[in-house]
């Protein structure tokens, strides 16, 4: 069974602090996607990383794909209340079309 | 471009009843996936349809079924509802490529009493 473990499961911090969310697996992924879900809405894609070692930036969010394509991280600099939400990672395997999903990190940024 | 539309938004049903949920994908998207989301289990894959054929199926009982029409619209059906079926059901559409990003609807919140 392929697993994608996310940590931490829950994080509550003050506005202005930095944080990192991790997504780890023993499987090698051809690509990995990060989504953010806000209450009452469906997940929205933030970024897709494809190449081992790849780093992508989206304003204050930095995404990194591990060199071996087994893990990824999301770093948020100077977190703001608008960053509050459930962050989900999903990995794509070469063997099939089904995405493997992490359980999510619930992030709360307090003003 | 219109997003993924799911109807209804909320649904309350009684144990033993059946329910049909509908999903209209983004125009041009041929793949539709269904997910069940609960606080305890996270996002669980139900099935995926591509060009009217079920291409992948998750580990759910046969009470959960789906279909896709020629216009890519999809429906999922749950028969003999159980209390544990209460969840947010999400539909996502994508282009045919394997690593294509998913575009989710806002879900149908099903409550079984």
Image: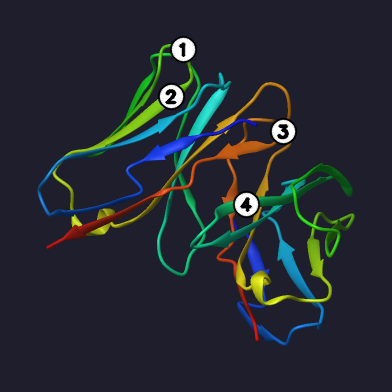
Q: Position of residue B69 (x, y in %)?
A: 88, 58
Q: Position of residue B20 (x, y in %)?
A: 79, 74
Tag 3–tag 2 contact (CB < 8 Å): no
For the residue pair A89 and A83, the one nearer the viewer reads as A89
Which residue is denoted by mark 3 in the rendering? A97
A60 w.r.t. A107: above or below: above
The chain that hosts pointer 4 is B
Residue B70, picture quadrant: bottom right
Q: Residue at the spot x=56%, y=21% of the render?
A: A27
Which residue is denoted by mark 4 in the rendering? B44
Which residue is denoted by mark 1 in the rendering? A68
Q: Same chain for the residues at labels 1 and 4, yes or no?
A: no
Left or right relative to A82: residue B76: right
Q: Work out how far the residue at label 4 is from the one at label 3, CA to CA, in angstroms.
A: 15 Å
Q: Residue at the spot x=17%, y=39% of the render?
A: A77
Q: Residue at the spot x=51%, y=30% of the render?
A: A32
Which residue is denoted by mark 2 in the rendering? A71
Tag 4–tag 3 contact (CB < 8 Å): no
């Amino acid at each position: 069974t392929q697993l994608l473990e996310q940590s931490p499961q829950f994080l509550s911090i003050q506005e202005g602090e930095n944080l990192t969310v991790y997504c780890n697996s023993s499987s090698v992924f051809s690509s990995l996607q990060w989504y953010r879900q806000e209450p009452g809405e469906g997940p929205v894609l933030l970024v897709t990383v494809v190449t081992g070692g790849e780093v992508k930036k989206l304003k204050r969010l930095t995404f990194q794909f591990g060199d071996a394509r087994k893990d990824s991280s999301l770093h948020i600099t100077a977190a703001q209340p608008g960053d509050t939400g459930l962050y989900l990672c999903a990995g794509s395997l070469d063997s099939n079309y089904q995405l493997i999903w992490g359980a999510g990190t619930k992030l709360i940024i307090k003003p | 471009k219109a997003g993924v539309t799911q109807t209804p938004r909320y649904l309350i049903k009684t144990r033993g009843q059946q329910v049909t949920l509908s999903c209209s994908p983004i125009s041009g998207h041929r793949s539709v996936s269904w997910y069940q989301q609960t606080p305890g289990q996270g996002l669980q894959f139900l099935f995926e349809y591509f060009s009217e054929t079920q291409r992948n199926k998750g580990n759910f009982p046969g009470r959960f079924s789906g279909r896709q029409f020629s216009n890519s619209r999809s429906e999922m059906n749950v028969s003999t509802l159980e209390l544990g079926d209460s969840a947010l059901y999400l539909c996502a559409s994508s282009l045919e490529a394997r690593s294509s990003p998913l575009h989710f609807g806002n879900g149908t919140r099903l409550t079984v009493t």
